[in-house]
Amino acid sequence: MSTIQNRVSEPPVSDELALVQAAKAGDVGAFEELVRRYDRNVFRIAQHITQNREDAEDVVQDAFLKAYGNLNQFQGQSKFYTWLVRIAVNEALMKLRRRRPERMVSLDEDVKTEEDSLPREVADWTPNPEQQYSQAELRDILSRTIQGLPPSFRTVFVLRDVEGLSTEETAEALELSIPAVKSRLLRARLQLRDRLSRYFQRRESADGRPKHDGGDGNQ
Amino acid sequence: MKCTEFLQELTNYLDGVIDDRTKAELEDHLAWCHNCYVVCDTTKKTIEIYRNSQLYELPEDLRTRLRTAIVSKCHAKKKTGPERV
């Protein structure tokens, strides 16, 4: 079984450092280029964490403005993107806390036991599960499924598996240890898999042949 | 290897960050344990589906509006000098 490949094609670091240096020296055009490079990523991360479109829009603005205002603190030891993600995640968590003051929202929140992630559904999936649903239905399923995870799990999942940050970069952006990132990632992946199985598992018809269960959403 | 041990290594296995010996043990387990094979395969599909999903794409008009607002505030900040933190 092959392994997962990262999809992110990274821009040259030297080019990025030059943009950061120019922005530090007051070149707003250079900073605008950094915004163009990463605004989609920041929006996606923010919406995954906050699960709210307006909050995600605010996070994009606030994170970039905070980055701009604090560029002198960026020392270049990490990548600009990792530094920016750290700012964006903090802004997004603040939004979430404001919206859900009754629930403690923290990346340090610990996870009950190993039991919570043990697979319950082990039925195989249909060969092309995503093709059973329309794009809109699929997005709805994926969105509702990831919403069910604790914020600390979905944040690690989105940084590692959606945005393609390395384990080390994720640990740095979230100020977590590497074992903590790995543990949360494993649980996030297993819980998402378990929940998606409800929609994607292969069903057998009465005569024992595989039956697709896409309902009216089949395409 | 037990199934619980397999699960503990699943993330490292899918990310391709394990030594050859552990990888061989995992693949030996996968060859006879159908449940772990299914869990491994469907976990990989879970990651791929999310990665390819285009969930929460930033629409181009909103993108332009946000960028314009950010750039205009950066210009304003430039005039007032750096933020004190």
Image (cartoon, coloured by chain):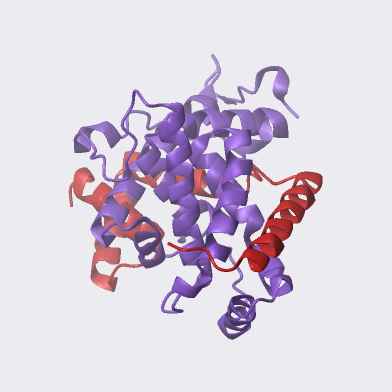
> Which residue ends up furthest to the right in the rendered image?
B61
> Which residue ends up furthest to the front in the rendered image?
B80
Give the camera-side residue of A25 and B7.
Answer: A25
Residue A25 vertical position relative to residue B24 in the rendered view, above or below = below
For chain B, give the colour.
red
Residue A63 vertical position relative to residue A105 in the rendered view, above or below = below
Give the camera-side residue of A171 and A166.
Answer: A171
Residue A111 seen anywhere in this rendered image of the structure: yes
Residue A5 seen anywhere in this rendered image of the structure: no
Give the camera-side residue of A209 and B29.
Answer: B29
Residue B68 vertical position relative to residue B56 in the rendered view, above or below = below
Q: Is residue A78 left or right of residue A132?
A: left
Give the camera-side residue of A78 and B16.
Answer: A78
For chain A, give the colour.
purple
Whole-percent x, y for residue A92 in the image? 48, 43
* x 23%, y 44%: residue: B3
Whole-percent x, y for residue A70 in the image? 50, 66
